[in-house]
Amino acid sequence: MLEMKNYREVGVFELLSAPLNPIGAFDAEAFKKEVGDLIKKDFRFIAVDLSAIDFLYSDAYNAFLFFQQQLQKNSGVLGVISNRKTVIEGINQAGLDKKIKIFDNEAAIIAFSAKLIKKTPKIKEEIIPKSKNQESVEVHSNLSKNPFSEKKTASSKFTVFFLLSLFLAALFLFYFVI
């Protein structure tokens, strides 16, 4: 049976979409359930995308602190994505800025993940869930491949060159035609 999920892999993190309640505010209860389920599956690096959230209530800060403590027991990290001043100030005022990792965007998560993998080479094997479910292991086995390796194949160089050429051609047409 196909299982619906509210998260996806970004770097070494499982990135959750921010659960919202009917009035559009962050739903801390749904967040607790989703993160609890991920921790039960032995995920250690979890982040939530708060980029569409304007503010957080205290129950969200309490949930962040609780799950950071749970993840820290297994050398894990809880992260949030936000570039909203009110959200970041709230996290700072709650004293969570020293406990959870704050990212500006997904690119920052990927950069942090690359540094983490470089700093701790064994982490690739460690973050694979200990679940006996082979499908879950296959999904996460891609982490053993280093996407930042220096070796580039001719086809990947050609693809990058081709896409860059298309972009420049479109930019040229847009600028001179319009």
Image (spheres, rainbow, N blue to C red):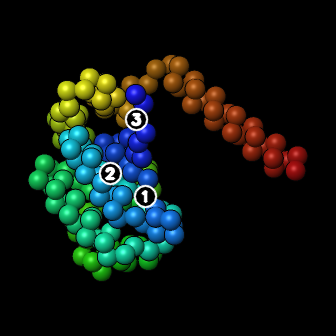
> x, y (%) of residue 84?
47, 71
Q: Nearer the viewer, mark 1 or mark 3?
A: 3
Residue at left 63%, top 32%? 163
Figure quadrant of residue 90: bottom left
Figure quadrant of residue 151: top left
Quarter of the figure with the N terminus: top left
Residue at left 27%, top 47%? 37
Residue type of the residue flagged with mark 1? Pro
Please determine whether, in this image, residue 57 is positioned above or below residue 123: below
Q: CA distance from mark 3 to mark 2?
A: 13 Å
Q: CA distance from mark 1 to mark 3?
A: 17 Å
Residue type of the residue flagged with mark 3? Glu
Instruction: Assign a secondary structure to mark 3.
Output: loop
Query: Where residue 3 is drawn, which disc sits there?
Result: 3
> x, y (%) of residue 78?
27, 56
Please determine whether, in this image, residue 173 is positioned above or below residue 80: above
